[in-house]
Amino acid sequence: MARITAGVATSHIPAIGAAIDLGKTRAPYWAPVFAGYDFSKHWIAAQKPDVVFLVYNDHASAFSLDIVPTFAIGCAEQFAPADEGWGPRQVPPVVGHPELAAHVAQSLIQSDFDLTVVNKMDVDHGLTVPLSLMFGQPQSWPCRVIPFAVNVVLYPPPSGMRCYRLGQALRAAIESFDADLEVQVWGTGGMSHQLQGPRAGLINQAFDRRFLDLLVTDPEALAQIPLVDYIREAGSEGIELVMWFIMRGALSARVKTAHRFYHVPASNTAVGHLILENVP
Amino acid sequence: MALQKPYLDIPGTTVFDADQSRVGYHLNTFCMSLMKADNRVRFKADERTYLDEWPMSDDQKQAVLARDYNRMIALGGNIYFLAKIFSCDGLSFQYAAATMTGMSQEAYAQMMLNGGRSPGDNHEKQR
């Protein structure tokens, strides 16, 4: 049977993608950010997951205001990098896992999570920047990826608790797939940041560090943070952090923190990164 | 009964909720069109003519022409849609964020290097 081996959380800032693509990762501004992912690149090279179930949000790339799904699962064979207004990132196409994605879609809908099934979709920096941070710049991505897009653009997004429960149902779905696959679940976005209005530039290190602590030790309590508190405390775009709960819900109650990294700033944003391993 | 909007007292912040989305639909849809290279060329060649192809309010069109991002947000724009405009201009998210704060890009970048804007004075509107 398929099994979930680990979870990864990371911010997915577009400027990080630009720094990688333009060869600036060793510039003084960026070097401390990428140093936080040195461990991660070695770790994942040793782990060799077969599939990454990658939870992210679309930033008005695949989904305009014509259709706004709260939870959308990518079931296609392949996903192209999106043109977000300056041409697509020159990164490999993302190869999906249609069989596992279809299995997860049916299983989650039967668990009362009403997913939107997407068979044609471009993927933006929300998905490709985490891949670049973890895998560097390979000719092709070394595993299959199932994109799972969560609406955090149009308020209200799903609550932290809704995402946590979805993660728990996701674990049951993946573990009932009849194939010998090692699967990681990634939650991306965050941490504190605000990109709009006179309050742009907000960073709340105390909020972020507490979030990193409690996501590991007491996610049930942390998941009860009301949505408005994210906006007030972590900035209007800090609300992306709800997506980390899908990753956490898919793991065991007890996990081992293999890696933790926090850095301010990357462009407008606080960078947070966790690698959590299931304790057998 | 009116919807609860517990976020209205957060200073300097416009939450892109269902009402904002309704008001900004055509503005944000224009922004999406800039994801195609051909449309970016046409927009840059004659912005006003291109904007007139969209059923936006004149206020919305003026805000786009002036690159007044706070005004665009007040008129229903969402930052991830508006990002297509400044990307089309070859400008970064940090540039756009700085313009919305009234700071120079240099001063804004330095604030971020110093740890960002403190949440201390930015929880609630002054009463």
Image (cartoon, rainbow, N blue to C red):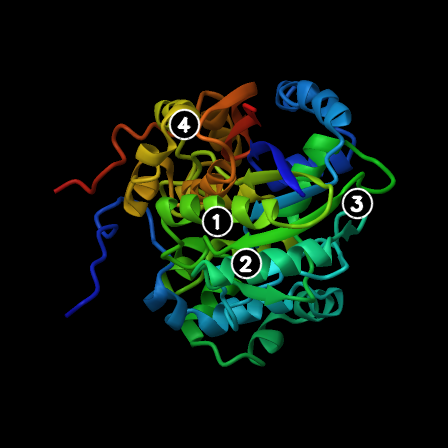
Query: Do pointers 1 and 2 mark residues of a single chain?
Result: yes
Residue wearing tag 1: A169
Residue wearing tag 3: A91
- Chain bearing mark 3: A
Q: CA distance from mark 1 to mark 2?
A: 8 Å
Residue at screen point 62% across, 20% down:
A36
Q: Amino acid at mark 3?
A: Val
Report the front residue among B62 and A90: A90
For the C terminus of chain B, the quadrant is top left
- Chain bearing mark 1: A
Q: Earlier in the sequence, mark 1 or mark 4?
A: 1
Residue at screen point 59% across, 39% down:
A186
- Chain bearing mark 4: A
Q: Where is residue A145 drawn, in percent x and y?
A: 70, 47
Residue A218, located in which quarter of the rendered image? top left
Q: Earlier in the sequence, mark 1 or mark 2?
A: 2
Residue A107: mark in rendering: 2
Q: Amino acid at mark 2?
A: Ser
- Chain bearing mark 2: A
Discs 3, 2 touching: Cβ within 8 Å: no
Q: Earlier in the sequence, mark 1 or mark 3?
A: 3
Q: Earlier in the sequence, mark 3 or mark 2?
A: 3
Residue at screen point 70% across, 68% down:
B45
Q: Earlier in the sequence, mark 3 or mark 4?
A: 3
Q: CA distance from mark 2 to mark 4?
A: 33 Å
Residue wearing tag 4: A208
Report the front residue among B28 and A188: A188
